[in-house]
Amino acid sequence: MQVLVDGGEFRDADARNRSITEFIANVKLLRVLPVGTSEYRSVAARIRMLGPGLEAAGLFEVVKPRDPEVATLLSG
C-alpha cells in the first residue's frame, strides 16, 4: 500500500507534494546565509511556517533534523 499526496489536506494540515523539497532547499540555503540578514530571517520564517504541516504529515516521526539551529526553529 502507498499513499500519494498531491496537494490538499493530509492529517488536517496542508501537505503539498513540494513541501519536503522546499523545506530541504531552505535548510540548505539557511546554512550559507549570514545570520541576522533580512534574507536569513525570511528563510528562517519559511522553515518555521513549513514545520507544522510537515509535522502533521508525520515527517518528523521518521526523520529528525541534525542541524541544531533548524531543530530550534522547528521547536518554537
Image (cartoon, rainbow, N blue to C red):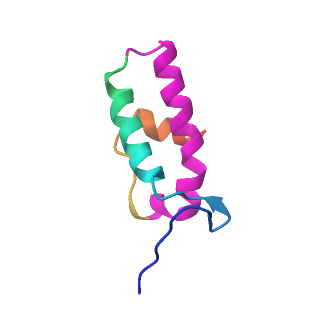
Residue at 52%, 55% in the rendered image: 54
Residue at 68%, 65% in the rendered image: 12
Query: Where's the C terminus, which quadrant?
Result: top right
Q: Is residue 25 left or right of residue 14?
A: left
| Image location (x, y in percent) of residue 2 | 41, 81
| Image location (x, y in percent) of residue 38 | 51, 14
Residue that sits furthest to the bottom in the current view: 1
Considering the whole magenta stretch, tell me its main secondary structure.
helix
| Image location (x, y in percent) of residue 64 | 40, 53
Specify whether residue 40 is painted magenta: yes
Q: Is residue 22 left or right of residue 51?
A: left
Q: Which residues are magenta?
A: 34-61
Residue at 52%, 21% in the rendered image: 41
Specify whether residue 54 is painted magenta: yes
| Image location (x, y in percent) of residue 50 | 55, 45
Residue that sits furthest to the right in the current view: 12
Q: How many marks?
A: 0
Residue that sits furthest to the front in the current view: 6
Query: Where's the N terminus, which quadrant?
Result: bottom left
Tell me if residue 75 comes above or below residue 30 in the rendering. Answer: below
